[in-house]
Image: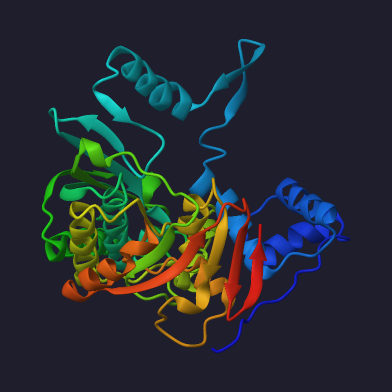
Amino acid sequence: MSQAVFRTIPLRDLPADQLLDLSKRMKLSLSSADMLAVQKIYQDEGREPTDVEMEVIAQTWSEHCKHRIFGAKIQHTLNGKEEVVDGLFKTYIRAVTEEICKNKPDFVLGAFEDNAGFVRLDDDKAVCLKVETHNHPSAIEPYAGANTGLGGVIRDILGAGKGAKPVASIDVFCFGPPNIEQDDIKAKDVIHPLGVMRGVVRGVRDYGNRMGIPTVNGAIQFDDTFIYNPLVFCGTAGIIPIKDIAKEVKPGHLLIAAGGRTGKDGLKGATFSSASLTTGSHEEDQTAVQIGNPIEEKKAADFVLAAREKGLIQFVTDCGAGGFSSAAGEMLRDTGGEVWLENAPLKAPDLESWQVFISESQERMVIAIEEKDLAAMHELAAIYQTELCVLAKADGSQRLKVFHHGTIVCDL
């Protein structure tokens, strides 16, 4: 399309029940309290939001991205006494890691900040590791869900520091009993655990093999509790020079997108995976599942690592569950900047503005460079046969302004 396609969402005067209905209609997975908070933002600004802005807020605040529930405090009663305690994450993951950091400050080189954590390997190199789940997509499309689950953590390693080299992968799968009778499954749209298992195993195997990254260990568990919502954990380890861990976006830096094209696959992945699976999810949420292309990712990976070796990368990250929205939003967090959606190569020409900005289409990395290095990046992209575009520029404005064919569609 040669013009921006977006709409204004009137919500400043809506009562709470209609705000929640709006969230459900747009599949934002925002609660009533969330929608009231959004309403207050736009009442203070004296304007209505665009659909692009609503989608950006929804993915940024989603449980998938923000982990507000996972990281929340828990109020409970024990022996008649009420108390508020930290949840599992803060107690058994963050607190333990912080204790290790305190006791071994030269061993843990980074945690809870980048796309992966870093520990020292020797005087010059560090090991980084990232593990995450791809449960909902794998329940709906086992092969594609697991395939892109592994592809995502590989990109997390590529986006760690100024670009780490992925060297090995791991996985853990939890499925329903493979010998259960189909008649014993109480929802007709649920894929039989044996079908889920076969698809997931093939998906992880194929992506890793085509990237040339071995899966070196894993585990599998069967239980009735996983019939309706299987768990698919994928992880990747990488190696990076310690000098390349620190990274920063500064005003004047260009943000370039490299790798795959943007399409309608992976739409609303963050909000979809933050909500409960229902019997309608298999039919209604197909577009939330991404389509993997490991050969494209291999080219993008080689390009990123070559650019890092030449000292051309100032900052790199992958397009997470919010696509360009999450990548550009994170990279421009401290500076602000302008994003130009019309520069993004598309799989199809009929994408609306919010779809271009939010799509989680796979195999895309966003890299901050100095403007003088743009020609060198184009030369490298030609060598590794990966597509490249200038997506944005950091400008020090402290605002995220998104343009599409010259029209501003998001200003946050």
Q: Residue at x 13, y 28 (%)?
A: 123
Q: Position of residue 198 (x, y in %)?
A: 22, 62
Q: How far from the left and from the top, in percent, is residue 215? A: 13, 50
- The image position of residue 321, as x and y in percent, is 45, 58
The answer to whether residue 180 is visible is no
Instruction: Tell me if I can see residue 70 in this picture.
Output: yes
Q: Is residue 313 left or right of residue 240?
A: right
Residue in the picture at 48% in, 65% down: 392
Quarter of the rendering containing residue 73? top right
Q: What is the basis of the colouring in this image?
A: rainbow
Nearest to the observer: residue 228 or residue 345 = 345
Relative to residue 397, is residue 8 drawn left or right?
A: right
70 vs 386, nearest the viewer:
386
Q: How many marks?
A: 0
- Name the side, left or right, on which 299 lies relative to 44: left
Residue 391, picture quadrant: bottom left
Q: Position of residue 393 (x, y in %)?
A: 49, 62
Relative to 314, does residue 364 appear above or below in the rendering?
below
The C terminus is located in which quarter? bottom right
Extreme front residue here? 372
- 349 vs 307, nearest the viewer: 307
Quarter occupied by the N terminus: bottom right
Identify the residue at image location x=56%, y=89%. Answer: 2
Frontmost residue, 150 versus 406: 406
